[in-house]
Image: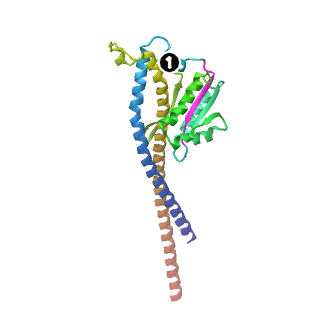
């Protein structure tokens, strides 16, 4: 009977775990809906802003990006690594950290610093990397203004020559079950290339103020939007990964509980059968 008690305790433990994972799945699903709506709503704006900036820059002669387009020999690199503040989200953080380590290997021999957004990435990298700042508090109140302040700091560091290249490492949100790790160049700006639509359109527009002034004013906004989109992508990906992980955990707990119930019933049946045989054996002994 002690064996039966042990199995009952395991069934109760697994059932409790299943309730927790199921609740976490539902919470993540609700948060994912809001995060998904946010990133879906801002993507058209971000893409159109980038397209507008590319098209305007491509029509100008010479250097149009100012200090942010300066191509220098890469000796000092800054990696902006975006992870989550909490765990239980499958391989979400591990994939970003793996990509970060690949970049560290790629830039071996150069000075590489790291700026972390997310406690998990900061905890994992603080012993092996030179972390200049941890901006995990962004997730406490994720707004464009808060992220724009971080982006402005990155722009200032690049313009001052502190870094020759800045890259973003984050999870791009595709859907609830799929997140794609991205290593995306933030600075310097890539050379401008006009779209085919603009190349085929010979319309001559009059700009006020000048195209040069418009481009120089759009560049900081575009960079701030790029970082905000990356953080929003990561935020939605985190909840998608956690919902998927908790769904799998709930399914595994359900399967384990069913197996334990089957084992319990077999053990109980064997115990009852043994007791019946003992009773029958005792009765026969009395009759003899």
Circle 1 sits in a helix, a strand or a loop, which is it?
A: loop
**Residue 85 location, x and y as percent?**
55, 44
As drawn, the residue found furthest toward the top would be: 61
Instruction: Out of 42 and 103, give the one closest to the viewer.
Output: 42
Q: How is the image coloured?
A: rainbow
Give the class, few, some or many, for how many residues have Cα within 10 Å of label 1's Cα (few <14, many ≥20): many
Instruction: Out of 161 and 265, give the one closest to the viewer.
Output: 161
Q: Is residue 186 magenta?
A: no
Q: Which residues are magenta?
A: 73-84
Q: Is residue 220 visible?
A: yes
**Residue 236 location, x and y as percent?**
46, 41
**Residue 285 location, x and y as percent?**
53, 85
Instruction: Out of 91 and 215, give the one closest to the viewer.
Output: 215
Q: Is residue 75 magenta?
A: yes
Determine the residue positioned at 42% across, 48% down: 30
Residue 2 occupies which quadrant of the picture?
bottom right
Determine the residue positioned at 48% across, 11% down: 62
Instruction: Out of 238 and 186, give the one closest to the viewer.
Output: 186
From this view, report whether residue 117 is shown above or below residue 62.
below
From this view, report whether residue 71 is shown above or below residue 8.
above
Determine the residue positioned at 50% across, 31% down: 227
Q: Is residue 176 visible?
A: no
Q: Quadrant of the N terminus?
A: bottom right
From this view, report whether residue 149 is shown above or below residue 85.
above
The number of numbered badges drawn on the structure is 1
As drawn, the residue found furthest toward the bottom would be: 287
Determine the residue positioned at 61% across, 29% down: 104
Pointer 1: what residue?
A: 65
From this view, report whether residue 260 is shown above or below residue 220.
below
């Amino acid at each position: 009977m002690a064996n039966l008690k042990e199995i009952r305790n395991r069934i109760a433990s697994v059932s409790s775990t299943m309730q927790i994972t199921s609740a976490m799945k539902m919470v993540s699903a609700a948060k994912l809906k809001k995060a998904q709506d946010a990133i879906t709503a801002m993507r058209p704006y971000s893409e159109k802003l980038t397209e507008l900036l590319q098209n305007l820059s491509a029509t100008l002669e010479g250097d149009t990006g100012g200090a942010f387009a300066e191509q220098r020999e890469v000796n000092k690199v800054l990696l902006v690594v975006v992870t989550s503040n909490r765990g239980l989200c499958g391989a979400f953080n591990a994939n970003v950290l793996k990509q970060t380590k690949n970049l560290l290997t790629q830039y071996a021999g150069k000075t590489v610093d790291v700026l972390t957004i997310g406690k998990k990435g900061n905890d994992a990298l603080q012993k092996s990397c030179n972390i200049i700042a941890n901006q995990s508090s962004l997730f406490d109140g994720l707004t464009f203004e808060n992220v724009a302040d971080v982006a402005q700091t990155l722009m200032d560091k690049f313009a001052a020559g502190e870094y020759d290249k800045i890259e973003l490492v984050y999870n791009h949100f595709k859907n609830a079950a799929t997140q794609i790790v991205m290593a995306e160049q933030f600075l310097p700006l890539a050379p401008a290339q006009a779209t085919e639509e603009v190349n085929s359109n010979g319309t001559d527009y009059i700009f006020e103020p000048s195209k040069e002034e418009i481009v120089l004013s759009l560049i900081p906004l575009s960079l701030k939007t790029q970082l905000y989109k990356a953080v929003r992508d990561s935020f939605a990906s985190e909840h998608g990964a956690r919902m998927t992980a908790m769904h799998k955990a709930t399914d595994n707990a359900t399967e384990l509980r069913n197996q334990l119930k089957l084992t319990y019933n077999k053990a109980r049946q064997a115990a009852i059968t043994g007791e019946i045989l003992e009773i029958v054996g005792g009765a026969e002994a009395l009759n003899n």
